[in-house]
Amino acid sequence: MRKNRKGAWRATGIVTALATAAAIASVAPVQAQSTAQLSAWVSDGWGGGTITSQPAGINCHQSAWDPYANNEPQPYPTGTCTASFEVGATVTFTATPDSGSYINDGPTPNPVTIRTGYNFTWVMFCPDGGLCSAG
């Protein structure tokens, strides 16, 4: 003789659904992200210069570098190359080449409207009358 188990399965399903609903209701609501990171990337054009942001936060300098002068790797940028800004803010950039360098391209994009997730701009400085990488 076979027993009818439909009632047991139905009861288990109802208990599971109620427990799941209770767990979901107890979770705090997700807060909207109010700030996000923005990074300034100075491409390896081999020239030197600084990129700054308005509002203030980014002040990133890359020294000029000659890859054929020695076996040293390109120096890392100095200063603040990543900063937090309010989501929705518009950040504009100014690129200033060092003496002996020029701006080959960028800053791009400019301006940047900050969104949640990854935000960036980049610039390439090249040496006057010298080598410039293709980026």
Image (cartoon, rainbow, N blue to C red):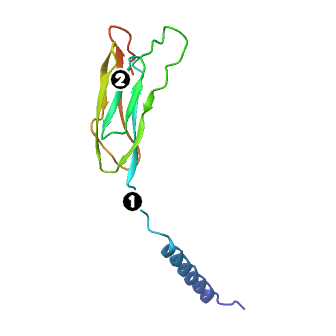
Which is nearer the eye, 135 or 2? Answer: 135
* Total residue callouts: 2
- Is 66 drawn above or below residue 88 in the view shown? above
How crowded pointer 1 is (Cα within 10 Å; few <14, some 14-19, many 20+) is rated as: few
The C terminus, quarter of image: top left
- Indicate the position of residue 47 as horizontal and vertical percent values: 38, 17
- Is 35 drawn above or below residue 44 in the view shown? below
Q: Earlier in the sequence, mark 1 or mark 2?
A: 1
How crowded pointer 2 is (Cα within 10 Å; few <14, some 14-19, many 20+) is rated as: many
Tell me the number on the disc at residue 50. Answer: none
Please identify the quarter of the rendering in which residue 52 is found: top left
Question: Residue at horizontal 58%, vertical 83%?
Answer: 15
Query: SS of the residue at dot 1?
Result: loop
Position of residue 51 in the picture relative to residue 78 (left or right): left
| Residue type, label 1 | Ala
| Residue type, label 2 | Met
Tell me the number on the disc at residue 124. Answer: 2
Please identify the quarter of the rendering in which residue 50 is found: top left
Question: Residue at horizontal 59%, vertical 86%?
Answer: 11
Question: Residue at horizontal 34%, vertical 29%?
Answer: 51
Which is nearer the eye, 11 or 90? Answer: 90
Question: Residue at horizontal 32%, vertical 11%?
Answer: 128
- Indicate the position of residue 68 as horizontal and vertical percent values: 48, 8
Name the residue tied to disc 1: 32
